[in-house]
Image (cartoon, rainbow, N blue to C red):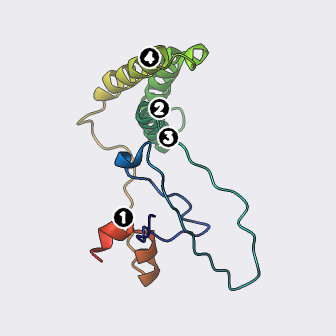
Amino acid sequence: MNGDPVQGLDPNRWEVILPEDCAGEKLKIDIQAYSRHRVEKFSQAFIAVRDQIVWSTYWDLRVAIEAAEEQPEGSHARLQIIEIVDRALREIDLNQVDDLDLYHSSLEKARGILRRGMRKFRGAAASGRLSVVSHSHLDLAWTWRLRDTGL
């Protein structure tokens, strides 16, 4: 980007997060691509601005849903979490996406409902499953942004 390497891209690592301070700036983006199997055509690229409130709401809801899925089928905890997620989702006003202030307000209300509802599980006796898996491979370095490698 502007002559400086940023990171590697491949079918599993397809996102480059642009620095926030580049808003409104003209960027020169060079992409060096390689496929050892066949000639490919780079057909498209997208640039988007991440809405941090939407992003955070998505992840808050996703984690709660995954927590519910880890609970035994029909368990009280699972049903409670699903109810909390349902109440939070009902607060999101999808009719207001064109008015960002109103939309963001509904997302913040949903996140508040989720936070307050999930608080009751803080410190609860473990009823889930913990899996610790480790794997190291040299190729993992390609998942790091260049600035994180110290190069």
Q: Is residue 131 left or right of residue 40?
A: left
Q: Nearer the viewer, mark 1 or mark 2?
A: 2
- Which amino acid is tagged 4? Asp
Q: Label 3 belongs to which residue?
A: 49
5 lies above or below 68: below
Q: Position of residue 26 (x, y in %)?
A: 48, 51
Secondary structure under the numbered disc 2 in the rendered image: helix
Whether residues under marks 1 and 3 lie with C-beta atoms below 8 angstroms apart, the answer is no
Label 2 CA crowd tier, 10 Å (few <14, some 14–19, many 20+):
some
Q: CA distance from mark 1 to mark 3?
A: 34 Å
Of the two numbered discs 1 and 4 on the same chain, state the one appearing first in sequence: 4
Of the two numbered discs 4 and 2 on the same chain, state the one appearing first in sequence: 2
Q: Is residue 144 left or right of residue 120?
A: right
Label 4 CA crowd tier, 10 Å (few <14, some 14–19, many 20+):
few
Image quarter where the C terminus lies is bottom left
Secondary structure under the numbered disc 1 in the rendered image: loop
Secondary structure under the numbered disc 4 in the rendered image: helix
Q: Nearer the viewer, mark 1 or mark 3?
A: 3
Label 3 CA crowd tier, 10 Å (few <14, some 14–19, many 20+):
few
Q: Is residue 102 left or right of residue 121?
A: right
Q: Position of residue 43 (x, y in %)?
A: 73, 61
- Which amino acid is tagged 2? Val
Of the two numbered discs 3 and 4 on the same chain, state the one appearing first in sequence: 3
Q: Label 2 belongs to which residue?
A: 54
Q: Label 1 belongs to which residue?
A: 132
Q: Label 4 belongs to which residue?
A: 101
Q: CA distance from mark 2 to mark 3?
A: 11 Å
Label 1 CA crowd tier, 10 Å (few <14, some 14–19, many 20+):
few
Of the two numbered discs 1 and 3 on the same chain, state the one appearing first in sequence: 3
